[in-house]
Amino acid sequence: GSTVGSNLQCNTCKKTYSGTQTHLDLVASSGSKQYDESMPLATELFRTPVVSFLYERGWRQNFVFGGFPGPEKEFDMAKNYLKRVLGGKIVDASCGSGMFTRLFAKSRLFSQVIALDYSENMLRQCYEFIEQEENFPKEKVTLVRADISRLPFESSSIDAVHAGAALHCWPSPSTAVAEISRVLRPGGVFVATTYIVDGPFMFLPFVNTFRQNMMGIAGSYFAVSERELEDLCRTCGLVGFTCMRNG
């Protein structure tokens, strides 16, 4: 239901966070009337009403050209990795308009689904789509606005984190994955889809330099190699890395 009037307080600093009609606002600047932090270009793009509206109305469908087989197939692929944590709590990180949030909730495979995104407009779209669904298990879903690099959860409190087509948009994947590693309980699972780039051309000196410069300008990572992904997960405390390539 509505989170209007909901108040949560940090046990450590006693800061109080409040809820809107659509979501709980748990970013650090929550509650400030004058101050608002701007994020890198890639993050700010998804905060716009236009992109939030278009995301499931044509934007996401174009991902098929990059190897993404579509939400239903991607959901089935994710479930294979999540078998050992079924029945637990899952965070749908960078949930966007909630495509996978709705699939996780309707599957009833998890006791709680937390839809988490930094974009207020994406969360509003997520809320609207949920409201339009018939017989939707709303009691299983909580919408949360938060920074992926500052997750508002206790350490070892989450069974699974899912990030669909999101890792390449994060300003600092290492900080985000380290946070995910922190909140996952022992034996928890992180499953994500992203773009992979590798091959003989990656050994050319100028390619990595160009890629780094573009990532610095846009504030997102576009694509990483499989070796980089495995190294990232390992250095952030995750074990048992596996990668499934699709196209």
Image (cartoon, helix red, strand yellow):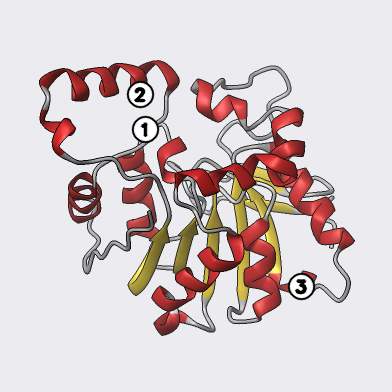
Residue type beneath disc 2: Met
Q: Secondary structure at mark 1?
A: loop
Q: Is residue 61 left or right of residue 170?
A: right
Residue 221 badge: 1
Q: Residue at x 32, y 45 (%)?
A: 196
Q: Is residue 103 left or right of residue 186?
A: right
Q: Is residue 21 left or right of residue 10?
A: right
Q: Residue at x 88, y 71 (%)?
A: 134
Residue type beneath disc 1: Tyr
- For disc 2, the marked residue is 215
Sooner in the amino-acid sequence: mark 2 or mark 3 = 3
* Whether residue 3 can be seen here: no
Q: Nearer the viewer, residue 144 or 129?
A: 129
The image position of residue 104, as x and y in percent, is 62, 70
Image quarter (top left, top right, bottom left or bottom right) of the C terminus: bottom left
- For disc 3, the marked residue is 139
Residue 87 location, quadrant: bottom right
